[in-house]
Structure formats: structure tokens, C-alpha cells
Amino acid sequence: MEFRQLEYFLGVASELHFSRAAEKLFIAQPALSRQIQQLEDNLGVLLFERDKRNVKLTSAGEYLREEAKQVISQLENISKRTQQIHKGESGEIRIGHPGSAIYSVIPPILTSLRTNFPEIKAKLSEVLEDDLFGNLKNYQVDVGFIREPFVDKNIVSKVIFEESFVLVLPENHWISQENFISLAQVKYESFVLPPRYAGSAYYDLLVRMCEREGFAPNISHESNYGATILRLVEHNLGVSLMPISYKFSSAMRVKFIELMDVPERTHLSMAWRKDDTNPVLLNFLKAAESVIFDNVV
């Protein structure tokens, strides 16, 4: 049984008239009749009862008609799916990101991705900064968002977002946006900050903000995860300095004091493997490029 024979069979089964079916199938009637005869011979059954005036499906023909419809539909879906995968219109993109990115750049990028490539599935993982480039090199993620600068000839890195910092305080803290003057007001507070790793430019940036006000932060707790830092601040275990995008995170009993007069800003970069020709990644990058990130939060 051939795919082409099934198409010819369904054409005749739909019209119940060989001449009309031949016209719609763009095949000569004698050739169409031969194809149907060959199908019947191969199956060893009679599919049509026919005389000079009428064509009628047999019981076996009615059964084959319903099954053939499903087979044709499935094959068409397989063909379409195969073409989508080849073009990168279907598949999975694995994204590594810091917690703050989910409150800033990731939602609009995924919205653009869904609009332009609805069959692409995004798999997101919150990844530590010092692990992200290793995950990229080891093909554990396809694209990453990171605040630390990184130079590697095999990795493409592009700054896509810039934002200011906020001082994060427990909800009942005496400092407010109205009476805030400078970070010197929290010089005697305990701080909850990310740990410092070798060459950690982001950590150094946070410490420099404090040192300019004449003090080194007294770090009582460390965490790489923004949600953990917010929870510790909420429970009066310290104050913190974080990107302003965390202000749009889930509600906790903390308050955010925008550091409007502080020159330091944090940059978020998007990184991917230079030699990666995965069409799904290329379409993800197109979706990301269609979103404008030049607004400063």
C-alpha cells in the first residue's frame, strides 16, 4: 500500500465518481482506475461496488476511508513538524538566568518568542553567575543572562539591559524614601549580599557603593539567590543592595529605596555559544532583538 494510492482512494471515496475524482487529482481517469485496482489487488479486497452508473463504497472501503484519513492527517502533521524543527520554528530553548531577570527582560522576550514562534518551548533555570558560562560551554543551556562581564572567544556576550540599584530594608525599618539621604545611614547595619568570588565585578560594585560613603559593609549572611536575600531582609536579618527590578517581585514585607543619586548601575548581558547553529537558538535571538531594552529602569 502506497501513500499515493491512499490519496487516490480518498479522492474517489469522496466523489464516488471516477471522472470527477480524476479531474480534482490531476490524473487521467484510466490511470486512476489502475491505481485503485492495484490497491484492491494488494489488499485482496473490493473497495468499491461500481457499475456503469454508480460507484459505492463496500464495508471494507468505508473502513479504509476512515483509517486512511487519519493516516494522511498524521503524515501531514509529521511533515509539517519536521519542517518546523528544521527551520527552528519548533523545539526547546534552554535558558539560564539570575533571579532578577525574570522581573525585567525575560517576560517580554518570551512574549515576543511566543508571538513569532509559538511552537518553541522555553525551559528556564535559575543559574548561579559563576556556573552559567560553564553550563553554556557544556551545552547544558543554550542562552544565558548574566551580570558578570566575561571574555571568551567561544562565547558571544551582548549587554541588553541597564538598571539602577535599590536599598532593600525590612518593612518596619525607620528609613523611608522620604528621609533617605545616603547609604551612610545604614553603615552600622548588617548586610545580606551575594558571596564574593575571584573577579566578581558585581560584588565589587556593591562594596564600592558603600566604600564611597565611608564604610565597608558588615556582611552577616550571603546568598546567590535574590528570593533568599529578600526573605532574610524580611526577617530583619540585614539590609541589602539589589537591582531595582526586584522591586517588581512577589510581595514580601520589605521596602525598596531607590538610589537615585548613585552613579553605579548594573548591566545584564545575554550570552550564547558563538558556533551554535541551532535554528531554535537563532529564532530566540531574533525574538530577543525585536524587544527594545534601551529603557533604563
Image: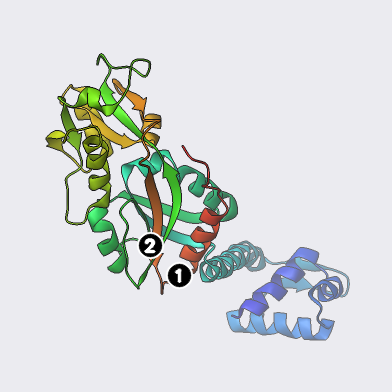
Q: Is residue 93 above or below residue 176?
A: below
Rendered image quadrant of residue 139:
bottom left
Residue at left offset 80%, top offset 67%: 16
User: Which picture quadrant has residue 226?
Assistant: top left
Q: Position of residue 14 (x, y in %)?
A: 76, 64
Q: Residue at x 67, y 85 (%)?
A: 38
Residue 213 is situated, as x and y percent measured from the top left of the image, at 24, 32
Q: Secondary structure at mark 2?
A: loop
The answer to whether one can see residue 47 in this image is: no
Q: Is residue 73 visible?
A: yes
Q: Residue at x 26, y 23 (%)?
A: 169
Q: Nearer the viewer, residue 170 or 131?
A: 170
Chosen colour scheme: rainbow
Within 10 Å of the Cα at label 2, are there few (<14), some (14-19), or many (20+) other Cα atoms?
many
Using residue 137 as the reference point, say whether residue 13 is left or right of it: right
According to the image, label 2 marks what residue?
Answer: 142
Name the image quarter holding residue 168: top left
Q: Secondary structure at mark 1?
A: loop
Front residue of this view, candidates 261 and 234: 261
| Contact (Cβ within 8 Å) of mark 1 with mark 2 | yes
* Place of residue 62 in the rendered image (x, y in percent of width and height, measured from the top left): 66, 63
- Which three-letter amino acid code belongs to the residue tagged 1? Asn
Inter-mark Cα distance, 1 to 2: 9 Å
Residue labelled with disc 1: 278
What is the total number of numbered labels drawn onto the structure image? 2
